[in-house]
């Protein structure tokens, strides 16, 4: 349809206007910015709450030798399990040189050695790994 | 007050249909933006504009619709760390 054929009741829209896009600057749709927190920032909160069982449930009841290995219950020179899982925050402090709660200097060293030796798939590994994150 | 967008190399911008995902390298944060936030960032540029100059720049390119909440939209971008106000 040419402009000459356009019925009078249809507004004549200049070409320049049709190329312009409408931009809604009001808050009709709510916030225009949604920030996604970095994954590391989220772990920072959970690190304080996560737990590391010593030993992990698969070896519950085993004693912890001074080098951190698990040995049969009652092994001489090894330490009985602490009786409760350690909190990520407690372990973080212990790795920095302070002592796990309710431990002697020797049992603390054994438990920390055990935690340092944790591997993927063992209970508490994810918690321990997150403690190593630079921003955790 | 002058509002500035970060330099182009500080941002990784990926349009995703209705959203624009923006990764802000200095903070390591990702933001999902909807209209008019990406347009505001583009108009501001690193050199920055005042609120009035931004409104004029946007009006030059777009037909502005809706209530004029441009100041609030800018505040959102400032709060997200994507725009600096000096």
Image (spheres, coloured by chain):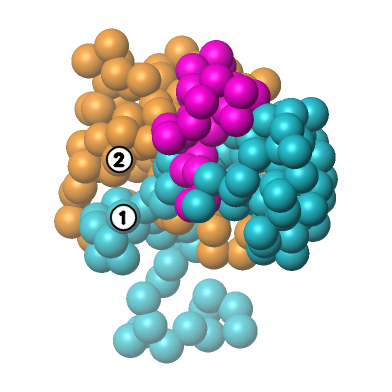
Q: Quadrant of residue B67?
A: bottom left
- Can residue A106 be seen in this snapshot? yes
Q: Percent position (x, y) of residue A26?
A: 24, 56
Q: Which residue is mark 1?
A: A31
State the extent of the magenta-drawn residues as a range. Answer: A84-109
Q: Percent position (x, y) of residue B54?
A: 33, 30
Tag on residue B76? Answer: 2
- Residue B19 vs residue B35: left or right? right
From this view, report whether residue B79 is shown above or below residue B8. Answer: below
Question: Any magenta on residue A134?
Answer: no
Q: Residue at x 61, y 23 (%)?
A: A106
Parent chain of label 2 = B
**Closest to the observer: A111 or B53?**
A111
- Residue B54 vs residue A66: left or right? left
Disc 1 + disc 2, Cβ < 8 Å: yes
Provide the letter of the chain coloured cyan.
Answer: A
**Closest to the observer: B86 or A41?**
A41
Residues marked 1 and 2, same chain: no
Q: Residue at x 74, y 60 (%)?
A: A59
Q: Percent position (x, y) of residue B65?
A: 28, 58
Q: Percent position (x, y) of residue A13?
A: 43, 67
Graded by Cα atoms within 10 Å as few (under 14), some (14 to 19) or many (20 or more), the crowding at tag 1 reads some
């Amino acid at each position: 349809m040419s402009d000459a054929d356009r019925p009078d009741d249809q507004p004549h829209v200049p070409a320049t206007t049709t190329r312009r896009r409408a931009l809604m600057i009001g808050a009709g749709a709510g916030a225009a910015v949604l920030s996604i927190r970095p994954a590391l920032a989220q772990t920072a909160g959970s690190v304080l709450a996560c737990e590391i069982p010593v030993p992990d449930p698969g070896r519950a009841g085993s004693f912890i030798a001074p080098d951190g290995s698990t040995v049969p219950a009652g092994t001489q020179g090894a330490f009985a399990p602490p009786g409760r899982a350690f909190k990520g925050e407690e372990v973080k402090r212990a790795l920095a040189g302070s002592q796990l709660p309710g431990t002697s200097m020797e049992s603390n060293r054994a438990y920390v050695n055990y935690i340092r030796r944790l591997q993927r798939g063992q209970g508490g590994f994810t918690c321990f790994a997150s403690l190593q994150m630079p921003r955790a | 007050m002058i509002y500035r967008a970060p330099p182009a190399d500080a941002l990784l911008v990926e349009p995703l249909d209705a959203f624009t995902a923006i990764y802000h390298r200095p903070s390591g944060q990702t933001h999902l933006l909807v209209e008019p936030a990406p347009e505001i960032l583009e108009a501001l540029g690193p050199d920055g504009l005042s609120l009035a100059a931004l409104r004029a720049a946007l009006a030059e390119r777009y037909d502005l619709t809706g209530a004029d909440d441009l100041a609030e939209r800018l505040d959102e971008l400032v709060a997200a760390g994507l725009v600096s106000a000096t």
